[in-house]
Amino acid sequence: MTVAIDGALWSFLTIARAMARSISLSFWSTAGVFVLAKASGLLRAILNRAAVPRDRILLTEIRSVDWQSLTFVGERHEIEFRIPPPGAREICRRLTTGLSEAEFDIRGNVVVDVAVTGEPEAFEDGSLKLQIEALTIAE
C-alpha cells in the first residue's frame, strides 16, 4: 500500500519526530492521544490500577522527556488529569491511594518513581485536576 503525504504534513511529521527525541511534549485530548510508548504504557497502567472507566477521566496534558544517569536510560513523565463530577473525589482517591508503592507492568520498562504532585485542585464545576510525575527506565 502506498500513502501520499503532502510536503507540509511530511515537514510537520519530521519536526514532531525530532521534537519527541529532544524536548518535552504536550498533548491535549479528551479521548485518545498519541504519546510516546513508555508514557502510554504508564498511562494505561495507572488507569487500570484504579479500575476507573476511561470515560470518567480526561487526560489534559502529558509530557515526556528523555532521562539518563551513568547506568540507566529512561524518561520522566508528567501527567495531568481532569476528573469531572459526579464522584470526582472518589475517583481521585482511587487513582492516588498507594500510588507511590504500586508496581506496574509495562513491557520493557520499570517504573522506579511515581508520585502525585501536590494536592488535587478543585474547580467551581466540581471537577478536580490531578498531576502525577513518574520516572521509567528501560529494562
Image (spheres, rainbow, N blue to C red):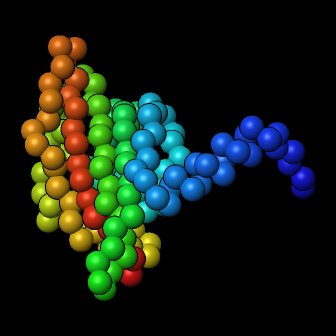
- Residue drawn at 82 percent across, 39 percent down: 6
Q: Quadrant of the N terminus?
A: bottom right
State how many labels appear. 0
- Residue drawn at 38 percent across, 54 percent down: 64
Q: Is residue 75 above or below residue 138?
A: above
Q: Position of residue 4 (x, y in %)?
A: 87, 45
Q: Judge from the rendering whether residue 121 lies leftward or rightward of residue 39; answer left or right.
A: left
- Residue drawn at 43 percent across, 62 percent down: 38
Q: Position of residue 3 (x, y in %)?
A: 86, 48
- Residue drawn at 53 percent across, 47 percent down: 34
Q: Judge from the rendering whether residue 91 lies leftward or rightward of residue 38; answer left or right.
A: left
Q: Quadrant of the C terminus?
A: bottom left
Residue 62 occupies quadrant? top left
Q: Position of residue 134 (x, y in %)?
A: 26, 59
- Outermost residue toward the top? 124
Pick the residue in front: 29 or 72: 72
Q: Is residue 52 above or below residue 127?
A: below
Q: Is residue 133 visible?
A: yes
Q: Judge from the rendering whether residue 98 lies leftward or rightward of residue 27; answer left or right.
A: left
Q: Is residue 36 above or below residue 34?
A: below
Q: Position of residue 60 (x, y in %)?
A: 36, 34
- Outermost residue toward the right? 2
Q: Is residue 41 visible?
A: no
